Image: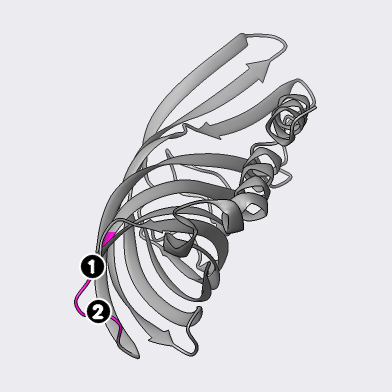
Amino acid sequence: MSILRIYAWKIKKMKSRKAAFILIISLLLAGAENLVWAERFSVHANGGFSFPREGNMRSGWESGFGFAYTLNKKVAAFFDFGFWKSEVEEEPGKLLDGKLSVTPFLFSLQYYFFEKRAFIPYVFAGIGYIFYDFKLKDIVTIPEITITQKVENGLGFQAGLGAQVQISDRLSLFGEALYLYRKAEGTTTTFDLNFGTTIEEFSLDTSTSLIRLGIRYLF
């Protein structure tokens, strides 16, 4: 069985989105040295801090990884996969006390202001798809009532700026500040054994500012 078929079979068997993306990245890394465009291909990992726009959402640690392909001397296409959690304090008509997990899959075009220098500033912008998972804290209700909340996944937009510091021919460090814009719909579902199920909808601004540092390796 070819390598492509093996990886395709593994992705089909594994339900986790993260596992599938990790397998894809592993395949790209395994074959990078043999590809014609290998010298334009890079991978990166980063960590940082998230600052949600909503006042009842707390800041939290952010981590991520990704890969990029250089289109020309000043433009590159980037794919990023991130993750962070925000503690949420109850706000009337919106989310109750709990924890919101955010997993964005982002695509952007990055423009470098200079070529082949030790210090290179850049700007970038793009779109992405954002997944949410909200976990309610234990709330006190009568046994007949169950409450759940959900935040809808969907498209978001990002823009930011950064700088890259070259420390060797293939290795560099980078720092970025970016803004991820996304307004999502949320639902509160209340199940009452006596009165049935009621669903209430609400709007939620999950836009987030991010500051992160990372390392990048060019093949």
Disc 2 residue crowd, few under 14, some 14–19, many 20+, Cα 10 Å:
few
175 falls in the magenta region: no
Which SS class for mark 1?
loop
Q: Nearer the viewer, residue 190 or 19?
A: 19
Q: Are marks 1 and 2 in contact (CB under 8 Å)?
A: yes
Q: Is 197 rendered above or below residue 8?
A: above
Q: Percent from the top left, x then y, of residue 4?
A: 68, 32
Most distant residue in the left direction: 113
Q: On the image, numbered disc 1 is attached to which residue? A: 74
The stretch in magenta equals 110-116
Q: Nearer the viewer, residue 143 or 157?
A: 157
Which residue is drawn at the image coordinates 77% and 31% (left, top)? 6
Q: Percent from the top left, x then y, of residue 180?
A: 34, 55
114 falls in the magenta region: yes
Mark 2 residue type: Glu
Mark 1 residue type: Lys
- What colour scheme was applied to this rendering of the protein? one colour
Q: Nearer the viewer, residue 211 or 66?
A: 66
How far is mark 1 from mark 2, CA to CA?
A: 7 Å
Q: Percent from the top left, x then y, of residue 201?
A: 41, 26
Q: On the image, numbered disc 2 is attached to which residue? A: 115
Which SS class for mark 2?
loop
